[in-house]
Amino acid sequence: MIRLFSLKALLIFKLSVRLLQFRLNVVDGIFKIFNCTFLIVDDPVGEIKPAYLLLGTTLFLQNLLSKFQGQQSVLYYYAATMTAFIFYAALNSLGQWKKHERLVAMIIISLFIFSACYIPEWNKRAFLNNTPMSNARHAILSKIDAAAPVAASVNLLPCLATRKELFVAGRTYNTFTHLTERLADNVMFAVIDFSMPLGNTHAIKELVLNKDWSVDTAVEDMVLLKRILGGAHPLIETLPSSRGHSSAPINILSNPVITLETLDIPELLPHGTTLLPITYGWDIHEDLPEEGRVSVSLFKGNQQILGKARLIAYGLPLKKGERIKETYNTLVPPLSPGTYTVSIDMIVNSLGNKYYWSGPVKRMVLVR
Protein backbone atom coordinates (compact mmCIF):
# COMPACT_ATOMS: atom_id res chain seq x y z
CA MET A 1 0.00 0.00 0.00
CA ILE A 2 2.81 2.36 0.93
CA ARG A 3 4.67 1.41 -2.23
CA LEU A 4 1.63 2.14 -4.40
CA PHE A 5 1.21 5.51 -2.70
CA SER A 6 4.89 6.30 -3.29
CA LEU A 7 4.62 5.44 -6.98
CA LYS A 8 1.59 7.72 -7.36
CA ALA A 9 3.37 10.56 -5.57
CA LEU A 10 6.47 10.09 -7.73
CA LEU A 11 4.37 10.07 -10.90
CA ILE A 12 2.53 13.25 -9.88
CA PHE A 13 5.86 14.90 -9.03
CA LYS A 14 7.37 14.02 -12.41
CA LEU A 15 4.29 15.28 -14.26
CA SER A 16 4.39 18.52 -12.25
CA VAL A 17 8.07 19.02 -13.07
CA ARG A 18 7.43 18.36 -16.79
CA LEU A 19 4.48 20.74 -16.80
CA LEU A 20 6.47 23.44 -14.99
CA GLN A 21 9.38 22.99 -17.39
CA PHE A 22 7.00 23.23 -20.37
CA ARG A 23 5.49 26.44 -19.02
CA LEU A 24 8.91 27.95 -18.38
CA ASN A 25 9.99 27.09 -21.93
CA VAL A 26 6.85 28.72 -23.33
CA VAL A 27 7.33 31.85 -21.24
CA ASP A 28 11.02 32.00 -22.16
CA GLY A 29 10.18 31.59 -25.83
CA ILE A 30 7.54 34.32 -25.69
CA PHE A 31 10.00 36.70 -24.05
CA LYS A 32 12.62 35.90 -26.66
CA ILE A 33 10.17 36.55 -29.50
CA PHE A 34 9.05 39.76 -27.78
CA ASN A 35 12.64 40.92 -27.47
CA CYS A 36 13.48 40.03 -31.03
CA THR A 37 10.30 41.51 -32.46
CA PHE A 38 10.24 44.80 -30.64
CA LEU A 39 14.02 44.94 -30.29
CA ILE A 40 14.12 45.83 -26.64
CA VAL A 41 17.43 43.99 -26.50
CA ASP A 42 19.41 42.11 -29.12
CA ASP A 43 18.63 38.45 -29.58
CA PRO A 44 20.78 36.36 -27.17
CA VAL A 45 22.02 34.24 -30.05
CA GLY A 46 23.09 37.38 -31.89
CA GLU A 47 21.24 36.50 -35.10
CA ILE A 48 18.85 39.47 -35.12
CA LYS A 49 19.93 43.09 -35.28
CA PRO A 50 17.77 46.12 -34.34
CA ALA A 51 17.22 47.25 -37.93
CA TYR A 52 13.62 46.41 -38.79
CA LEU A 53 11.88 48.98 -36.62
CA LEU A 54 14.44 51.65 -37.46
CA LEU A 55 12.61 52.06 -40.78
CA GLY A 56 9.65 53.51 -38.87
CA THR A 57 11.65 55.74 -36.55
CA THR A 58 10.78 58.90 -38.49
CA LEU A 59 7.05 58.26 -38.17
CA PHE A 60 7.42 57.33 -34.51
CA LEU A 61 9.32 60.52 -33.67
CA GLN A 62 6.90 62.62 -35.70
CA ASN A 63 4.00 61.41 -33.55
CA LEU A 64 6.00 61.48 -30.32
CA LEU A 65 7.27 65.05 -30.70
CA SER A 66 4.15 66.59 -32.26
CA LYS A 67 2.36 69.41 -30.46
CA PHE A 68 -0.97 67.97 -31.63
CA GLN A 69 -2.25 65.80 -28.79
CA GLY A 70 -4.18 63.54 -31.13
CA GLN A 71 -0.94 62.09 -32.51
CA GLN A 72 -0.22 60.53 -29.11
CA SER A 73 -3.74 59.19 -28.64
CA VAL A 74 -5.05 55.74 -29.56
CA LEU A 75 -8.36 57.39 -30.50
CA TYR A 76 -6.78 58.71 -33.72
CA TYR A 77 -5.26 56.88 -36.66
CA TYR A 78 -1.74 58.32 -36.42
CA ALA A 79 -0.35 55.44 -34.33
CA ALA A 80 -1.48 52.97 -37.00
CA THR A 81 1.34 54.15 -39.27
CA MET A 82 3.77 52.06 -37.19
CA THR A 83 1.73 48.87 -37.63
CA ALA A 84 3.34 47.85 -40.91
CA PHE A 85 6.84 48.06 -39.44
CA ILE A 86 5.84 46.09 -36.33
CA PHE A 87 4.42 43.28 -38.48
CA TYR A 88 7.50 43.36 -40.71
CA ALA A 89 9.75 43.02 -37.67
CA ALA A 90 7.60 40.22 -36.27
CA LEU A 91 7.69 38.19 -39.49
CA ASN A 92 11.43 38.61 -39.89
CA SER A 93 11.99 37.63 -36.26
CA LEU A 94 9.91 34.47 -36.64
CA GLY A 95 11.91 33.63 -39.74
CA GLN A 96 15.07 33.44 -37.61
CA TRP A 97 13.59 30.76 -35.34
CA LYS A 98 14.46 27.78 -37.51
CA LYS A 99 16.02 26.06 -34.50
CA HIS A 100 12.75 26.31 -32.57
CA GLU A 101 10.25 24.80 -34.99
CA ARG A 102 8.29 23.09 -32.20
CA LEU A 103 7.82 26.34 -30.32
CA VAL A 104 6.75 28.22 -33.45
CA ALA A 105 4.38 25.37 -34.37
CA MET A 106 2.90 25.49 -30.86
CA ILE A 107 2.32 29.24 -31.12
CA ILE A 108 0.65 28.88 -34.54
CA ILE A 109 -1.61 26.07 -33.25
CA SER A 110 -2.52 28.21 -30.23
CA LEU A 111 -3.44 31.08 -32.52
CA PHE A 112 -5.69 28.79 -34.57
CA ILE A 113 -7.41 27.52 -31.40
CA PHE A 114 -7.83 31.08 -30.16
CA SER A 115 -9.29 32.12 -33.52
CA ALA A 116 -11.68 29.15 -33.58
CA CYS A 117 -13.00 30.12 -30.15
CA TYR A 118 -13.83 33.59 -31.44
CA ILE A 119 -15.40 32.56 -34.76
CA PRO A 120 -18.96 32.84 -33.31
CA GLU A 121 -18.15 36.37 -32.14
CA TRP A 122 -16.76 37.27 -35.56
CA ASN A 123 -19.89 35.90 -37.24
CA LYS A 124 -22.01 37.97 -34.89
CA ARG A 125 -20.08 41.12 -35.77
CA ALA A 126 -20.32 40.34 -39.49
CA PHE A 127 -24.07 39.88 -39.09
CA LEU A 128 -24.38 43.19 -37.25
CA ASN A 129 -22.47 44.96 -40.03
CA ASN A 130 -24.71 43.43 -42.69
CA THR A 131 -27.68 45.64 -41.84
CA PRO A 132 -29.98 47.67 -44.10
CA MET A 133 -28.30 50.88 -42.91
CA SER A 134 -24.76 49.61 -43.58
CA ASN A 135 -25.87 48.40 -47.02
CA ALA A 136 -27.41 51.80 -47.73
CA ARG A 137 -24.18 53.49 -46.61
CA HIS A 138 -22.13 51.39 -49.04
CA ALA A 139 -24.62 52.09 -51.84
CA ILE A 140 -24.37 55.84 -51.25
CA LEU A 141 -20.56 55.80 -51.26
CA SER A 142 -20.53 53.77 -54.49
CA LYS A 143 -22.53 56.52 -56.25
CA ILE A 144 -19.62 58.97 -55.99
CA ASP A 145 -17.46 59.14 -59.12
CA ALA A 146 -14.17 57.34 -58.53
CA ALA A 147 -12.02 60.25 -59.74
CA ALA A 148 -14.11 63.07 -58.25
CA PRO A 149 -12.81 65.17 -55.33
CA VAL A 150 -15.08 64.68 -52.33
CA ALA A 151 -15.64 66.14 -48.88
CA ALA A 152 -16.67 63.69 -46.18
CA SER A 153 -17.27 63.50 -42.46
CA VAL A 154 -14.33 62.12 -40.48
CA ASN A 155 -15.69 58.59 -39.96
CA LEU A 156 -16.09 58.12 -43.74
CA LEU A 157 -12.56 59.21 -44.68
CA PRO A 158 -11.07 55.66 -44.51
CA CYS A 159 -13.72 54.45 -47.01
CA LEU A 160 -12.59 57.13 -49.49
CA ALA A 161 -8.86 57.16 -48.72
CA THR A 162 -7.76 55.99 -52.20
CA ARG A 163 -8.87 59.25 -53.82
CA LYS A 164 -6.34 61.85 -54.88
CA GLU A 165 -8.38 64.75 -53.44
CA LEU A 166 -10.22 64.20 -50.17
CA PHE A 167 -11.43 66.89 -47.78
CA VAL A 168 -12.96 66.96 -44.31
CA ALA A 169 -16.52 68.28 -44.56
CA GLY A 170 -17.01 71.32 -42.37
CA ARG A 171 -13.35 71.83 -41.49
CA THR A 172 -12.48 75.51 -41.58
CA TYR A 173 -9.19 75.41 -39.67
CA ASN A 174 -6.11 73.26 -40.26
CA THR A 175 -4.54 72.20 -36.96
CA PHE A 176 -1.18 71.55 -38.65
CA THR A 177 -0.75 74.70 -40.73
CA HIS A 178 -2.84 76.89 -38.39
CA LEU A 179 -4.51 78.39 -41.45
CA THR A 180 -8.18 78.82 -42.26
CA GLU A 181 -9.56 76.57 -44.97
CA ARG A 182 -12.45 76.66 -47.40
CA LEU A 183 -13.89 73.93 -49.54
CA ALA A 184 -12.24 73.87 -52.96
CA ASP A 185 -14.38 74.89 -55.94
CA ASN A 186 -13.68 71.61 -57.76
CA VAL A 187 -15.31 69.53 -55.01
CA MET A 188 -18.60 68.30 -56.47
CA PHE A 189 -19.65 65.79 -53.80
CA ALA A 190 -20.06 65.95 -50.04
CA VAL A 191 -21.05 62.89 -48.02
CA ILE A 192 -21.97 63.34 -44.36
CA ASP A 193 -22.90 60.84 -41.66
CA PHE A 194 -24.95 62.82 -39.15
CA SER A 195 -25.07 59.87 -36.74
CA MET A 196 -21.43 60.57 -35.79
CA PRO A 197 -19.88 63.63 -34.08
CA LEU A 198 -19.32 66.30 -36.73
CA GLY A 199 -17.02 68.76 -35.01
CA ASN A 200 -17.80 72.18 -36.51
CA THR A 201 -21.59 71.88 -36.76
CA HIS A 202 -21.96 75.54 -37.73
CA ALA A 203 -19.81 74.98 -40.85
CA ILE A 204 -21.83 71.84 -41.70
CA LYS A 205 -25.05 73.83 -41.31
CA GLU A 206 -23.74 76.51 -43.69
CA LEU A 207 -22.95 73.77 -46.22
CA VAL A 208 -26.35 72.04 -46.13
CA LEU A 209 -28.23 75.37 -46.24
CA ASN A 210 -26.33 76.42 -49.36
CA LYS A 211 -28.70 76.21 -52.33
CA ASP A 212 -25.78 75.27 -54.59
CA TRP A 213 -25.67 71.89 -52.81
CA SER A 214 -28.51 69.55 -53.69
CA VAL A 215 -29.51 66.29 -52.02
CA ASP A 216 -28.56 63.42 -54.31
CA THR A 217 -29.39 60.57 -51.92
CA ALA A 218 -30.40 60.52 -48.26
CA VAL A 219 -31.07 57.51 -46.06
CA GLU A 220 -31.67 58.43 -42.44
CA ASP A 221 -28.52 60.21 -41.17
CA MET A 222 -26.40 59.32 -44.22
CA VAL A 223 -26.60 62.10 -46.82
CA LEU A 224 -24.91 62.57 -50.20
CA LEU A 225 -24.88 66.14 -51.50
CA LYS A 226 -23.98 67.16 -55.05
CA ARG A 227 -22.93 70.63 -56.11
CA ILE A 228 -25.44 72.00 -58.64
CA LEU A 229 -25.15 75.72 -59.28
CA GLY A 230 -28.61 77.25 -58.96
CA GLY A 231 -32.02 75.66 -58.56
CA ALA A 232 -30.85 72.95 -56.19
CA HIS A 233 -32.80 71.10 -53.51
CA PRO A 234 -30.96 71.70 -50.21
CA LEU A 235 -31.05 69.26 -47.32
CA ILE A 236 -32.52 71.91 -45.02
CA GLU A 237 -34.49 74.84 -46.39
CA THR A 238 -34.94 78.12 -44.54
CA LEU A 239 -38.43 79.62 -44.55
CA PRO A 240 -39.50 83.25 -44.12
CA SER A 241 -40.68 84.26 -40.68
CA SER A 242 -44.43 83.86 -40.10
CA ARG A 243 -44.56 86.22 -37.13
CA GLY A 244 -47.00 89.06 -37.52
CA HIS A 245 -48.91 87.39 -40.38
CA SER A 246 -52.46 86.12 -40.07
CA SER A 247 -51.66 83.23 -42.40
CA ALA A 248 -49.34 81.50 -39.94
CA PRO A 249 -49.42 77.70 -40.20
CA ILE A 250 -51.52 75.61 -37.80
CA ASN A 251 -49.34 74.25 -35.02
CA ILE A 252 -49.25 70.44 -34.89
CA LEU A 253 -46.95 70.00 -31.88
CA SER A 254 -45.77 72.91 -29.78
CA ASN A 255 -43.83 73.80 -26.65
CA PRO A 256 -41.97 76.92 -25.45
CA VAL A 257 -38.80 75.88 -27.32
CA ILE A 258 -39.96 74.70 -30.76
CA THR A 259 -43.13 74.22 -32.79
CA LEU A 260 -43.82 71.58 -35.40
CA GLU A 261 -45.83 73.68 -37.85
CA THR A 262 -46.19 71.29 -40.76
CA LEU A 263 -45.91 67.53 -41.15
CA ASP A 264 -46.05 65.88 -44.57
CA ILE A 265 -46.21 62.07 -44.77
CA PRO A 266 -47.16 60.26 -47.99
CA GLU A 267 -50.68 58.85 -47.82
CA LEU A 268 -49.85 56.11 -50.33
CA LEU A 269 -46.69 54.01 -50.60
CA PRO A 270 -45.83 51.17 -53.00
CA HIS A 271 -45.70 47.58 -51.80
CA GLY A 272 -42.20 46.54 -50.64
CA THR A 273 -40.96 50.07 -49.99
CA THR A 274 -38.14 50.43 -47.44
CA LEU A 275 -38.04 54.24 -47.10
CA LEU A 276 -40.61 56.41 -45.37
CA PRO A 277 -40.02 60.09 -46.26
CA ILE A 278 -41.30 62.59 -43.68
CA THR A 279 -41.08 66.36 -44.14
CA TYR A 280 -41.07 68.55 -41.04
CA GLY A 281 -41.59 72.30 -40.78
CA TRP A 282 -40.08 73.77 -37.61
CA ASP A 283 -40.43 77.18 -35.93
CA ILE A 284 -37.72 77.87 -33.34
CA HIS A 285 -38.67 79.93 -30.26
CA GLU A 286 -35.42 79.50 -28.31
CA ASP A 287 -31.88 78.50 -29.23
CA LEU A 288 -32.24 74.74 -29.62
CA PRO A 289 -29.53 72.50 -28.14
CA GLU A 290 -28.46 69.60 -30.27
CA GLU A 291 -30.29 67.14 -28.01
CA GLY A 292 -33.72 67.94 -29.47
CA ARG A 293 -35.26 64.70 -30.76
CA VAL A 294 -38.27 63.52 -32.68
CA SER A 295 -39.37 59.88 -32.55
CA VAL A 296 -41.16 57.97 -35.31
CA SER A 297 -43.22 54.86 -34.61
CA LEU A 298 -44.92 52.69 -37.23
CA PHE A 299 -47.89 50.45 -36.40
CA LYS A 300 -49.93 47.93 -38.35
CA GLY A 301 -53.04 47.46 -36.28
CA ASN A 302 -51.87 47.02 -32.69
CA GLN A 303 -48.45 45.67 -33.70
CA GLN A 304 -45.52 48.09 -33.57
CA ILE A 305 -43.23 47.51 -36.55
CA LEU A 306 -40.75 50.33 -36.02
CA GLY A 307 -39.65 52.74 -33.34
CA LYS A 308 -36.80 55.20 -33.98
CA ALA A 309 -35.61 58.51 -32.55
CA ARG A 310 -33.57 61.07 -34.44
CA LEU A 311 -32.10 64.51 -33.85
CA ILE A 312 -34.17 67.44 -35.05
CA ALA A 313 -32.56 69.06 -38.12
CA TYR A 314 -29.88 66.33 -38.15
CA GLY A 315 -28.49 67.66 -34.87
CA LEU A 316 -27.43 71.01 -36.35
CA PRO A 317 -27.68 74.10 -34.10
CA LEU A 318 -30.89 76.11 -34.50
CA LYS A 319 -31.26 79.72 -33.44
CA LYS A 320 -34.22 81.59 -32.03
CA GLY A 321 -36.45 82.98 -34.80
CA GLU A 322 -35.42 80.46 -37.48
CA ARG A 323 -38.01 78.56 -39.51
CA ILE A 324 -36.80 75.54 -41.47
CA LYS A 325 -38.12 72.65 -43.50
CA GLU A 326 -36.35 69.29 -43.64
CA THR A 327 -37.07 65.87 -45.14
CA TYR A 328 -35.90 62.73 -43.38
CA ASN A 329 -36.00 59.31 -45.06
CA THR A 330 -36.58 56.68 -42.38
CA LEU A 331 -35.56 53.08 -43.09
CA VAL A 332 -38.43 50.67 -42.54
CA PRO A 333 -38.79 46.92 -43.10
CA PRO A 334 -40.25 46.00 -46.52
CA LEU A 335 -43.92 46.91 -46.12
CA SER A 336 -46.65 44.50 -47.14
CA PRO A 337 -50.02 45.78 -48.39
CA GLY A 338 -52.26 47.21 -45.69
CA THR A 339 -53.01 50.29 -43.61
CA TYR A 340 -50.33 51.64 -41.30
CA THR A 341 -50.27 54.32 -38.60
CA VAL A 342 -47.32 56.69 -38.25
CA SER A 343 -46.96 58.25 -34.79
CA ILE A 344 -44.74 61.30 -34.17
CA ASP A 345 -43.51 62.51 -30.76
CA MET A 346 -40.85 65.06 -29.88
CA ILE A 347 -38.82 65.84 -26.77
CA VAL A 348 -36.58 68.87 -26.40
CA ASN A 349 -34.81 70.59 -23.54
CA SER A 350 -34.33 74.29 -23.07
CA LEU A 351 -31.07 75.96 -22.13
CA GLY A 352 -32.24 75.68 -18.50
CA ASN A 353 -32.33 71.87 -18.86
CA LYS A 354 -36.12 71.79 -18.61
CA TYR A 355 -37.51 69.01 -20.78
CA TYR A 356 -40.67 69.32 -22.87
CA TRP A 357 -42.51 66.32 -24.27
CA SER A 358 -45.07 66.83 -27.04
CA GLY A 359 -47.19 64.32 -28.91
CA PRO A 360 -48.16 62.02 -30.28
CA VAL A 361 -49.61 63.10 -33.61
CA LYS A 362 -50.73 60.30 -35.94
CA ARG A 363 -51.13 59.89 -39.68
CA MET A 364 -52.51 57.02 -41.74
CA VAL A 365 -50.51 55.48 -44.60
CA LEU A 366 -51.86 53.04 -47.17
CA VAL A 367 -49.46 50.51 -48.73
CA ARG A 368 -50.59 48.66 -51.85
Image: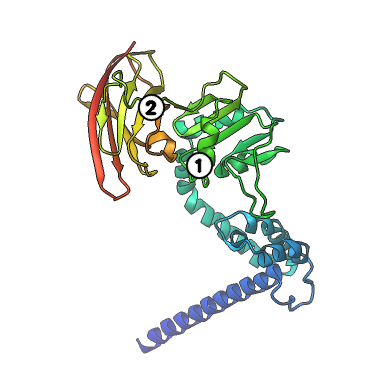
Task: State left or right for residue 228 relative to residue 218.
Answer: right
Question: Residue at 25% across / 32% down in the picture?
Answer: 254
Q: Regarding mark 2 in the picture, which secondary structure is present there?
A: loop
Which residue corresponds to mark 2?
241
Q: Secondary structure at mark 1?
A: helix
**Whether residue 333 is visible:** no
Three-letter amino acid code at the position of disc 2: Ser
Give the alpha-carbon distance from disc 2 to disc 1, as whole Å.
21 Å
> Furthest residue to the front?
244
Q: Is residue 294 visible?
A: yes
Image x and y of residue 6, in percent: 41, 87
Quadrant for residue 361, please give it.
top left
* Residue lying furthest bottom: 2
What residue do we see at 45% from left, 47% from top?
A: 120
Tell which residue pokes out farthest to the left in this image. Answer: 302
Compare residues 45 and 14 and report the one nearer the observer.
Answer: 45
Tell me if mark 1 has few (under 14), some (14-19) or many (20+) residues whose alpha carbon lies within 10 angstroms of its own.
few
Out of 367 and 14, give the one closest to the viewer. 367
Quadrant position of residue 163 = top right
Q: Does residue 21 appear to the left or right of 102 in the view shown?
A: left
Q: State the scheme by which the image is colored.
A: rainbow
Name the image quarter holding the C terminus.
top left
**What's the residue type where badge 1 is placed?**
His
Question: Which mark identifies residue 202?
Answer: 1
